[in-house]
Amino acid sequence: MVDRMAVQQYIARYMQFAEGYPYSRNIDGIEFTVVKLATKQELTIIGVYRSPRIPVARLYCALIDIIAQDTSEQNIIIGDFNIN
């Protein structure tokens, strides 16, 4: 499992974020970290981790949920989807 706090602390040392960012959220076993930079708030970066044990259909539903709640004009979705 990814240590969300360690990742956030590492990134926070080098970037200035929009207020309330970054934050982490778990939706049905899918881990998300959402980032917006203070200097480029029209961009949202969404980091994703899906365990191989979680059904792919759950990943799709969780992505739809997070995108509906927190996106910008431009979005980057990165991560480990464990889809071979």
Image (cartoon, helix red, strand yellow):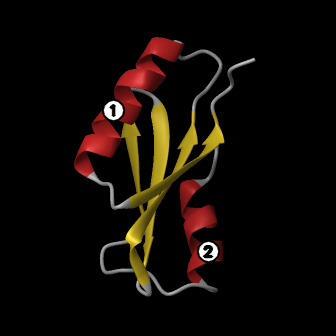
Q: Nearer the observer, disc 1 or disc 2?
A: 1
Q: Element under label 2?
A: helix
Question: What mark, if any, has residue 64 been given in the picture?
Answer: 1
Q: Measuring 35% from the left and 23% from the top, which residue is drawn there?
A: 61
In the rendered image, which quarter contains the C terminus?
top right
Q: Position of residue 73 (x, y in %)?
A: 35, 61
Q: Which residue is depicted at the point 55% across and 68% down?
A: 8
Say which residue label 2 marks: 11
Q: How many labels, in total?
A: 2
Amino acid type at circle 1 is Ile
The numbered mark, 1 or 2, whose residue comes first in the sequence reads 2
Question: Residue drawn at (62%, 85%), measured in percent from left and top?
Answer: 13
Left or right: 25, with 45 as reference point:
left
Residue 53: where, in percent of width, then height? 60, 15
Q: CA distance from mark 1 to mark 2?
A: 25 Å
**Residue at the right extreme of this rendering:** 84
Q: Nearer the viewer, residue 76 or 8?
A: 76
Q: Nearer the viewer, residue 22 or 9?
A: 22
The amino acid type, in three-letter code, at marker 2 is Ile
| Quadrant where the N terminus is found in the figure | top right
Q: Secondary structure at mark 1?
A: helix
Identify the residue at image location x=33%, y=55%: 71
Residue 79 percent location from the top left of the image? 63, 44
Q: Is residue 10 left or right of residue 31?
A: right
